[in-house]
Image (spheres, rainbow, N blue to C red):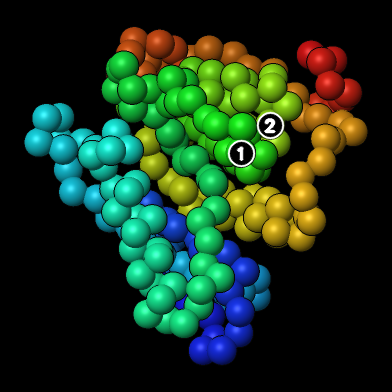
Amino acid sequence: MVIPGASAEVKATWVVFDGGQDYSKWYEDRQVRAFADEQRLAIVLAIDYRSKEREDRIVLPEKGVGRALFAALDQFAAASGHGELQSAAIAYAPGQYEPLGMNTIELSGEALRSPQLVIANGGDKVNGTERPYAYFKKYFDLGAPRTFVVQNQLPHCCLQNERNLILEWLRAILGAEKPTRASSYGYLAVEPTKVMDDGKRPTFNATSGRVGSLGAC
């Protein structure tokens, strides 16, 4: 954990969780660190052990890193003297093998109120775009503050490409007193590709975007 300033109150905790160089580079990125310092965010790099079943992440909350992560945050808060540490979500190239796909997640009413940015990649052969979008639409249609972005043609990589967008999204979210229903919404037109995800579903790329009122698809 990196805590900005020894005595300044921390506004929230930014947990960077997953494996691979994308995430470690993000954690070490100078602009990300500068943003965290500016916004008084503690940054945590969380690494999970691989599942013996599939050589992948253990995604079940009762078995995976989730419970341990929240316990660790409590311990960090006590050890650092920052009792205000909180947990806060950006889902990058999200997905999982069936039947535990991103689209199967059930959120509580309290979790629905937390803003979330979902980023998928148009050339991702692992998680694809359909499952992340299904998750986004499921809760967006319920009025949850959700944003969906697709990086055209990119494979299962390249988080750094979205750095400026992510930091601006976070700045807007952290500056808002509470989520409110927007007066206008962004819409994407998309086209399927020949790339298939691991569930044999075609991915899609964005062809255009526009802003309109709710439901004006």
Residue, disc 2: 144
Residue, disc 1: 110
Q: Secondary structure at mark 2?
A: loop
Q: Secondary structure at mark 1?
A: helix
Task: Choose top left, top right, bottom left or bottom right for residue 126.
Answer: top left
> Residue 16 in the image: x percent, y percent?
42, 56
Name the quadrant of the C terminus. Answer: top right
Which residue shows up at 84% across the image and 21% down it? 214
Is 153 situated above or below 117? Answer: above
Task: Tell me the distance, in whole angstroms, between the alpha carbons under discs 1 and 2.
Answer: 10 Å
Which residue shows up at 62% across the image and 21% down it? 137
Is 168 situated above or below 158? Answer: below
Return the residue nearer the eye: 192 or 114: 114
Horizontal side of 176 relative to 46 (left or right) equals: right
Question: For the residue carrying disc 2, how many other residues have a C-alpha within 10 Å: few (<14), some (14-19), or many (20+)?
Answer: many
Which residue shows up at 54% across the image and 46% down it? 89
Horizontal side of 148 relative to 188 (left or right) equals: left
Labelled disc at residue 78:
none
> Residue 136 in the image: x percent, y percent?
58, 26
> Residue 204 in the image: x percent, y percent?
53, 19
